[in-house]
Each structure stands twice: as C-alpha cells, then as structure tokens.
Amino acid sequence: MAVVLVDAGGTNIGSVRYALQRLGVDAALTSDAATIRAADKVILPGVGAAGPGMARLRGMGLVGLLRSLTQPVLGVCLGMQLLCTRSEEGDTECLGLISAPVQRFTEAPGLRVPHMGWNRLATVRPHPLLAGLGEDEQAYFVHSFAVPTGDWTLATADYGGPFSAVVARGNFHGMQFHPERSAAVGAKLLKNFLAL
Amino acid sequence: MLSRRIIPCLDVRDGKVVKGVRFRDHVVMGEIVELALRYRDEGADELVFYDITASPEGRSVDRGWVERVARAIDIPFCVAGGIRSVDEARAVLHAGADKISVNSPALERPALIDELAAAFGVQCVVVGIDSLRDGDGEWRVRQYTGDPAKTQALARRTLDWLVEAQQRGAGEIVLNCMGSDGVRRGYDLAQLEVARALCRVPLVASGGAGAPAHFRDAFVDADVDGALAASVFHSGAIAIPELKRYLRDQGVAVRVS
C-alpha cells in the first residue's frame, strides 16, 4: 500500500512519518502531483498558520490536485483545517472539501488558548475511522482554531463547548488532534485510516 | 474536558539524563530514549528535555537524540536548550520535537519569541522562566541556570517577564520556582497563583514536587495546566499511574490509560 505525506511544510511531518513507521508503513514525503494522485492513501499533515499553509499548497500547485483526489485523504491538525471552507486565521480561503468554517477559540476564565493537552473524544457518528474507540479515550490537541460541530462531525471534544475532533465527508477525513502524539489511541485511529 | 498534564522533565547533559539538587551537583539518571519510553509506558502526558549545558556553553541542542526520541515515543515532547534562532528551532522541530522552549536566549534577545511565534505559531513556542525570590521579596528572573558558575540574577521581575513573553507570542509558560526546586516540599503555590492570574496561555508548574498532594495543590489551588517534575519520577518515589489515580480520586481531570 502506497501512503504519501503531502509536504505542506508543517513541522510535524517527521512525527507523522515515524508514527506510520511504528505501524509498519513507510510513507513517502512528497509534493509531486503524480505521486500523490497514484497513492492509495494521502495524508496532509500540518502545524502552523492557515495562510502560509494554503500559500504553500498553492505555490506547489497542489490545490486543484488535492480537490480532485478520490482515495482516502486524512488531514491532521492544520491539515484538517485546510480541508474546510474558510479559516478565521488570517481570513484564509481553504480547500473547501468539508463545508465547515474554522473559528478561533474564545478565551474565557479557565479557558486558555491555545487548547493544549489531552482531551476526551466522544463519538457522535459511528464510522470505520473510529472503530474500537472506547468511552474514555483521550487524544493530544494543540490548536487555537477549531471547527464547530456540524453534519461533518464524527467525534467531538469539549473545550468551553463541543467542537469537531474528527470530521469526514466522502473520502476526505480530518483529525484536529495529533494522532502521531496520542499514544495508543492515536495509533489505533491511524491504523483505522490505513484500513479504509 | 481538558486533562491536567503530568510532565516528567529530563535534564540532558552530554547525551544522558541527569538531575541535580537546586540545579547543582548533577548525577546521571539514565539513557534518554530508555527513560522516555519508560515514562510513555507509565502514562506521562508529555515530556520535556532540557539540554542544561547548551545555553551556558553557547551552543544549540544536539539534534541526534531529538530524532531518536521522536522515532521511539508517541506522546508529545518539548525540547529546550540554547535555541537562539528560528533556524535552530526549525531544525529541532523538524527532528520531531512538538514544541521548543526558550529561556536564557529569550532573555538575551526577547524578539526571539516574536520570531519563533511568527515562524511556527504560538502553539510551538514555550517560554521557560527560572525565578527566585530576592531579599526584598520580589521574584526575579535568573539566567544560565544550567551552570551554577554562570547563573546570573537579572533585574527583570518574573511577573513582568511573564506578561511580556505572552505579548510576544509565548504559547505556554513553564515557571520554574528555583527556591523550591529539588527539595520536594511542594510547588511554590504563592508564586504560581500570582502567575496564573497574569497568564492567559497554559501555565506549567515546575520545582518542588515531592508528594502526590503537591500535584493536587498545584492543579486545584494554583490552577496550573501542567505540573513538571524530575527527581520524584526518576527515583521512583512517585509512580505516575498511582499519582494519576490519586488525582482522579481528588477530582482532578487526568488521563488514566
């Protein structure tokens, strides 16, 4: 199975790659359109800001290609946000593959931004991506912007209210947390993606 | 609900994990990857590696072990030690660290915080503050604490620096209360509570953990997001699974695997 990591310039690319290696999959890091199109699975990692993230995808000429993919695609953290319609971060137009907005967390007493740490995943819609996910399993989040809940939401986490932790529409999937840094839970969810 | 984080801190010197008392007299505690894996298996929520000699010696962190750790573990980790530029930070992040922490170099040149936040986003940028109460009752910042011979007391007030660091783009603050460090009598709750009131980003307590109740006090009384400790974990005096069960029973939100 050919799994590719889109070289979107995020700093977590190494970590995602190592996580896949721990699952026995050697993923190629690439920005080559033909390689991405031919892959069985495509992962769009990403750490950083939405504006530079989209600018990099545009600069590499990958926007149209990513929109046209039909195999399972997984966006991680910023990568998930880039799959959405528009981000409040720098008022950035994103890929529009999941018709959801990306909004900044509102600071409040006891609600620090960024949302940083382990938070519980709650399944709202069963999906093969969530197979085997238990009642009280937590994943590691680090982000200041989030996707609200909607018909795209598979699982939520709660930080001053529920937000989308896992999303899907058709062959496009996203995880707001870092599965590569979410211990056994993250490994299970990555494995589920590889099995889609 | 967001869990409070238990964060073992591994001080790294010449490629080994070491620990000193009140930042002095370091003894070797073990191999980096071995200890990282042990803490991962015990349920640590995050790890922090401080290359304690990098800053006083004017060199950056050794990236070889960063990559070895990144390959081995599947929990987040932060690397600190002499990161002086965006390029050095990028190298550490690309080696697989999730966050970088700056301390002495940010005191040398505070704009470093702005540059790191602009390059990587605030979520990658931790500012570590070493703080000690002076004779006049003020908490002030210390620099180059990795080497007692080079440690400097600065005129800068801890709380002023905490506010400035956030304005410049710190996504998390680790407040190391040196007066309580290594002596296991509890975190400096008075200082942490004052810091908490001024800290809008995640705040991590450091220095003084000696018993499970000390963690509870830091989370409940000082409302910190994470608690960092070294010697009590390295020595086995506190086992993380038991600590987490205790905290859960005390009503603290934690991740129990």
Image (cartoon, coloured by chain):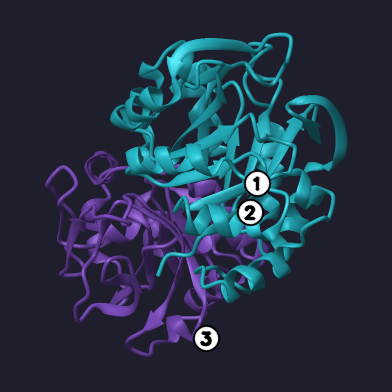
Residue at 43% across, 14% down: B156
Q: Is residue A189 left or right of residue B208?
A: left
Q: Tell me the residue that label 1 is attached to.
A: B186
The reply to whether label 2 and label 1 mark residues of one chain is yes
Q: Residue A78 carries which label?
A: none
Asked if B214 appears above or below A71 in the picture, the reply is above
The residues bearing labels 2 and 3 have C-alpha atoms spaced at a distance of 31 Å
Residue at 38% across, 73% down: A72
The location of residue B56, given as percent across then percent down, is 66, 13
Q: Tell me the residue that label 2 is attached to.
A: B214
The residues bearing labels 3 and 1 have C-alpha atoms spaced at a distance of 35 Å
The reply to whether label 3 and label 1 mark residues of one chain is no
The location of residue B53, given as percent across then percent down, is 71, 20
Q: In this view, does B171 lie to the left or right of B229?
A: left
**Amino acid tagged 2:** His
Q: The cyan chain is which one?
A: B
Asked if A70 appears above or below B130 in the picture, the reply is below
Q: Tell me the residue that label 3 is attached to.
A: A134
The reply to whether label 2 and label 3 mark residues of one chain is no
Decide which of B108, A129 is in the foreground and name it. B108
Chain A's colour is: purple
Of the two numbered discs 3 and 1 in the rendering, the one whose residue sits closer to the viewer: 1
The location of residue B62, given as percent across then percent down, is 68, 27
**Amino acid tagged 3:** Gly
